[in-house]
Image (cartoon, rainbow, N blue to C red):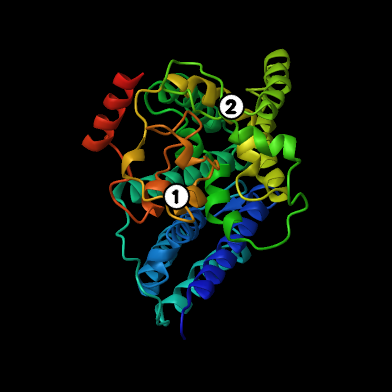
């Protein structure tokens, strides 16, 4: 069977949707059963969909990810996460089929797709490993909460908030939205590849333009060209912060589950990442704290080729007008490095400022 890129996406997309369905059926119904291999099936589906250009030309390599999930399922068939201790042959069989079918389709397939000319950045591969790993951990602690009745999710959310509010924004800004958020992983892997017509296809212009406005100098010259933190983000944050504080919802087992599932469900209404850009109360104050982050991606304006269509801007999950930035990415950047990988030129978006860019900034400084 010839595996085109479209077919590769279809196979992995539906395998991932099936894994999500089996997970929800096992965790949130009276069955209370989860096969550990299903968590690795989720990881395999996300990893394949986050590396489409690279795995579509190598379907047999992608098949081994599903084989590993199948192996874990076989090894843990007698030790599932189960409340009754009686097992569930139906869910075990569904988990096996969930891993076996995409494996067989991909291992037998041949692809005529050409591998990308530009090699995958190691940092992007590392980011997707972290994304998939955090999602699997989140799914695991959620299942423990509802099947076993214990609360490992409290530790997960405690560390999640401490690092993404107090630590990461100081050093690497809004990395939560590019590396750690389960909803971000769901959107970047699955929702981005779903082609159904969204109920809210276009946001009102007054809201849409918020993410493209250049103003709000909050930390010197660094963010002079940074987009405003959209007012809709802050409007979403205030009621959620009020509710969390007044009613002390953190120890309530349904709350951390419902707000993340709420984000995932609401994201189905909008285009890819539009909810993150304008309405996510989690990302709002992370973005504010990230205005003074120590590490940013450099945009070497002096070396930009001014392409007719900027591939880096098209790949940005936060719709940053990259070509309008002065010399580095603004606080709204989530350091996913998608722009760096999408740009066909290696010296335009980099980790360190290019010598030519330093010379340009120095000359402009003297001119001022």
Q: Is residue 81 visible?
A: no
- The image shows residue 187, relative to residue 243, as above or below, that is below
In this view of the protein, which residue sits in the foreground, 300 or 244?
Answer: 300
In this view of the protein, which residue sits in the foreground, 50 or 43?
Answer: 50
Query: What residue did someone put label 1 on?
Result: 312
Residue furthest out toward the bottom: 1
Q: Dot 1: within a 10 Å radius of its alpha carbon, few (fewer than 14), some, or many (20 or more) residues?
A: many
In this view of the protein, which residue sits in the foreground, 210 or 366?
Answer: 366
Q: Secondary structure at mark 2?
A: loop
Residue furthest out toward the left: 355
Q: Estimate the x, y position of residue 282 in percent, counting from the top left.
A: 60, 29
In this view of the protein, which residue sits in the foreground, 11 or 69?
Answer: 11
Name the quarter where the C terminus is drawn.
top left
- The image shows residue 139, relative to residue 46, as above or below, that is above
Image-quadrant location for residue 366: top left
Tell me how far mark 1 sits from mark 2, CA to CA: 20 Å
Q: Secondary structure at mark 1?
A: helix
Q: Which mark is residue 266?
A: none
285 displayed left or right of 359: right
- At x 49%, y 51%, the residue is 315
Residue furthest out toward the top: 246
Q: Estimate the x, y position of residue 170 in percent, counting from the top left.
A: 40, 20
Q: Is residue 12 visible?
A: yes
60 displayed left or right of 310: left
- At x 37%, y 31%, the residue is 296
Residue furthest out toward the front: 367
Whichever of labels 1 and 2 marks the residue nearer the N terminus, that label is 2
Q: Dot 2: within a 10 Å radius of its alpha carbon, few (fewer than 14), some, or many (20 or more) residues?
A: many
Query: What residue did someone put label 2 on?
Result: 228
295 displayed left or right of 315: left
- The image shows residue 125, relative to residue 291, as above or below, that is below
């Amino acid at each position: 069977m010839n595996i085109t890129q479209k077919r590769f996406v279809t196979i992995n997309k539906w395998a991932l949707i099936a894994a999500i369905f089996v997970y929800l059926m096992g965790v949130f119904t009276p069955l209370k059963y989860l096969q550990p291999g299903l968590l690795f099936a989720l990881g395999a589906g996300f990893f394949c969909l986050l590396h489409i250009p690279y795995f579509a030309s190598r379907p047999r390599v992608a098949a081994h990810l599903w084989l590993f999930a199948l192996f874990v399922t076989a090894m843990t068939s007698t030790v599932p996460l189960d409340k009754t201790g009686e097992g569930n042959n139906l869910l075990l069989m569904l988990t096996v089929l969930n891993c076996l079918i995409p494996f067989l389709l991909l291992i037998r397939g041949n692809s005529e797709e050409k591998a990308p000319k530009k090699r995958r950045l190691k940092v992007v591969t590392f980011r997707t490993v972290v994304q998939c790993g955090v999602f699997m951990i989140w799914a695991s602690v959620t299942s423990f909460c509802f099947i076993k009745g214990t609360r490992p999710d409290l530790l997960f959310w405690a560390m999640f908030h401490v690092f993404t509010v107090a630590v990461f924004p100081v050093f690497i800004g809004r990395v939560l939205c590019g590396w750690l958020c389960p909803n971000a992983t769901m959107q970047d892997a699955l929702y981005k590849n779903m082609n159904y017509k969204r109920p809210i296809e276009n946001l009102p212009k007054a809201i849409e333009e918020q993410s493209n406005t250049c103003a709000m100098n909050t930390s010197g010259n660094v963010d002079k060209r940074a987009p405003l933190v959209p007012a809709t983000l802050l409007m979403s944050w205030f009621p959620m912060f009020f509710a969390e504080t007044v009613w002390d919802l953190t120890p309530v087992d349904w709350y951390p589950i419902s707000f993340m599932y709420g984000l995932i469900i609401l994201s189905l209404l909008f285009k890819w990442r539009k909810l993150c850009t304008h309405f996510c109360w989690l990302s709002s104050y992370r973005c504010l704290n990230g205005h003074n982050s120590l590490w940013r991606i450099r945009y070497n304006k002096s070396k930009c080729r001014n392409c007719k269509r900027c591939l880096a801007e098209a790949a940005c999950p936060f719709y940053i007008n990259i070509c309008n930035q002065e010399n580095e990415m603004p606080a709204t950047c989530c350091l996913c490095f998608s722009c760096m990988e999408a740009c066909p030129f290696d010296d335009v978006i980099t980790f360190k400022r290019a010598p030519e860019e330093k010379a340009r900034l120095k000359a402009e400084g003297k001119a001022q």
